[in-house]
Amino acid sequence: MDYDLIATSTFGIESITAKELKKLGYEDLVIENGKVTFSGDEMDIAITNTWLRTADRILIKMAEFKATTFEELFQGTLAVDWGSLIPANGKMHVVGKSIKSTLFSVPDCQSIVKKAVVKSMQSKYNTEWFPEDGPIYKIEVALLKDIVTLTIDTTGPGLHKRGYRENAGEAPLKETLAASLVLISRWNNESLLIDPFCGSGTILIEAAMIGINQAPGLYRRFECENWPTMDAETWEQVREGAHSAIKNNDMKLIGYDINGPVLRKARENAQKAKIDRYIDFQKLDFNELSSRKKNCFIITNPPYGQRIGELDEVKSLYKKLGEFHENLPSWDMNILTSFEGFEALFGEKASKNRKLYNGKIKCYYYQYLAK
C-alpha cells in the first residue's frame, strides 16, 4: 500500500534529511519547516526508519484539511478510513499540538479526534467497543494556521535512539544532530577526524557509522514492526541489506576529553555501536593538544559556558581554538556552540555558519575550511 510519508527533523536540518532521502532513491520530496514529505510503501517505511541518520521519526500522513470549529475537526477526522491501517484491537493513543490556530485547546482537539477515529472504526468493524490491547498506533493531530494534519507514528522511540547510548555525558548531543554535523562537514573516511571535547563520544560514533556505511537503526526495533500490516519478512530483507552494505575500512578517529569517567562511557557506547575499533579515546586537556599532521578534520561541540563560573574558562578555550586553527591552516574545523561572540574570540570569521538547535538551545555551526 502506498502512503504519504513524513520524515520529521529538527529545525535547520530538513535539507540534510532531504539529501539522505535522495541518496536512498526517493524523489518528489516536499521540504517544509521541520519535515520532508515523500511517498512510499511498507518497505519504504522499514528502509527510512533503518537508514535515516538525521530524521526524528517517520509518520504516515492520514489526512490534511482546514478546521476552525470542533465540528469541522470531527468530520474531517471521521472521513478517514482508519480501519485500513488500525486493527480492531489496536491501541489508539492521540497526541496533539496547535500553533497559530483557532482551535488552540490541544486536550479538546485530542479528545475530538479520538472520538472521530473510534466512530470511523465502529463503522469499519461493525462493533461498538474496542479492547485496545494490541499494537500501539500513536495518532497526532497537528494544527498550524487552521490546517489540520493527522498522522500515525511508525517509529516509536525517536530515531535518535540508536541503542548504543544508555551512557551519556553531562550535556549529551542528540545523535541525529551529531550525524548532521558530520554530514554538513567535508569530512570523509580517508581523513583523520578529531573531536577534542568528545564527551560520551556521540559525534565520533556517528561519524564512524557514516564512515563504514552502517545503518543507524540496524540494531533497534520500531513500533510499526508490531503492526499486522507490516510483514516481518520486509524487515528481515531491509536488515540483511543493511548488514551487507557495511564497508569496513582503515579509517581512524580520535576523541579527547579531560573527564576520565565520561571517556569510559564513550568507550562503552562505541562498543555497543559495534564501531569501537575505529575510535581511539584518550584523556587529554585541549590546551595540551598539538599536531604536525596536515589535512585533518575537527568536528566538535565544545563547552558553551552556560554554568556560573565557566564563562572565562570558555572564552579562553575559544581563543585557543583560534590559535590552533592559525597554526594548522590545512585543517577543516567545524564547531557547534551557542556562544554569541564566538567568532570574535576565535579571531576569524567562519567560512560558513548555520543556525541549528541542540535541544532547545539555539546554536551556530561555524565551519572554518582549510586554506
Image (spheres, rainbow, N blue to C red):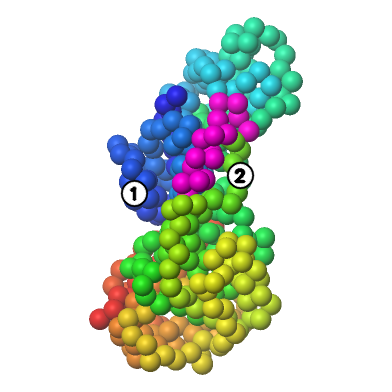
Is residue 203 something one can see in this rendering? no
Residue drawn at (45%, 82%), measured in percent from left and top? 318
Residue 48 placed where, x, y %?
A: 46, 43
**As drawn, which residue projects farthest toward the left?**
371
Query: What residue lies at 57% left-to-right and 17% top-to-bottom?
Result: 83
For the record, the magenta segment spans 226-242
Look at the picture and state if 124 lies above or below 264.
above
Q: Which mark sits nearer the N-terminus, 1 or 2?
A: 1
Q: Secondary structure at mark 2?
A: loop
Which residue in the protein does label 2 denote? 221
Tell me the quarter of the picture where residue 110 sits: top right
Number of residues whose C-alpha sits closer than 10 Å to that of mark 1, classed few (under 14), some (14–19) or many (20 or more)? few
Q: Looking at numbered disc 1 in the image, what kind of residue is underneath it?
A: Lys
Residue bearing mark 1: 23
Relative to 55, is 305 on the left or the right?
right
Q: Position of residue 325 (x, y in %)?
A: 36, 85
User: Under tag 1, what secondary structure?
Assistant: helix
Q: How many marks?
A: 2
Where is residue 366? Give x, y as percent: 37, 71
